[in-house]
Structure formats: structure tokens, C-alpha cells
Amino acid sequence: MKDFNFTACFGNVDKQVRLLNMFGSTGGSGGCHIYIDKYFCGQIFKRNGVWMLFANKIDQFTYEDVEILGDIIERELM
């Protein structure tokens, strides 16, 4: 398992984000678990070239957030 940690700004509050690659870099799914301040928030996968998010609170993420997370996963974890 590989992970990538960073600080993200949520409004005026900084939170710790951890992307945990549970599925390895093979297979092409790019699937990761997303943790914010050590709380599991959901999973992100790449399907047919599109990043898809399955989140506990879907309104917590915008389309742009999903694209940014996908870029980080491709750059740092794959």
C-alpha cells in the first residue's frame, strides 16, 4: 500500500488529507481511499478514463475536487 498526505484548505480551515492506494499501481483502476483528518470519506476510482467518487457525503466534493484528487493520484501513487 502506498499513500500520499497533504494539507488542504476547506474554507478557512486547513485539514489533513490522506490518499491511500489500497489496490496497488497495477490493474489501471487507480483506486484510493480518501481520509480527511483521519476520517474515512470515500473512494475514488478511474473508469474508462474518468475519475469517479463514491463518498460518504457527496456534497463535500466538487467536480473540480475529484479532478484534482485524480491528478494527484496519477502523479504520486501510480
Image: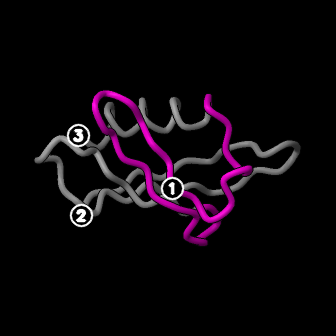
Lower sequence index among marks 2 and 3:
2
Q: What amino acid does circle 3 point to?
A: Met
Q: Residue furthest front?
A: 48
Q: What amino acid does circle 1 point to?
A: Phe
Q: Which residue is mark 2?
A: 1
Q: Which residue is mark 3?
A: 78
User: Residue at coordinates 54% horizontally, 48% vertically from top-left?
Assistant: 6
Magenta-span inclusion, residue 38? yes
**In the rendering, which numbered label is found on residue 14?**
none
Q: In the picture, which quadrant includes the C terminus?
A: top left
Q: Nearer the viewer, residue 57 or 68?
A: 57
Q: What amino acid does circle 2 point to?
A: Met
Residue 46 drawn at (x, y percent):
33, 39
Lower sequence index among marks 3 and 1:
1
**Mark 3 to mark 1: distance in Å?**
20 Å
Task: Answer above or below: position of 28 versus 31.
Answer: above
Query: In the figure, is residue 3 to the left or right of 19?
Result: left
**Mark 2 to mark 1: distance in Å?**
20 Å
Query: In the figure, is residue 17 to the left or right of 61?
Result: left
**In the rendering, which numbered label is found on residue 54?**
1
Q: Secondary structure at mark 3?
A: loop
Q: Quadrant of residue 16?
A: bottom right
Residue 12 drawn at (x, y percent):
88, 44
Residue range in magenta is: 36-64
Q: Secondary structure at mark 1?
A: strand
Callout 2 environment at 10 Å: few (<14), some (14 to 19), or many (20+)?
few
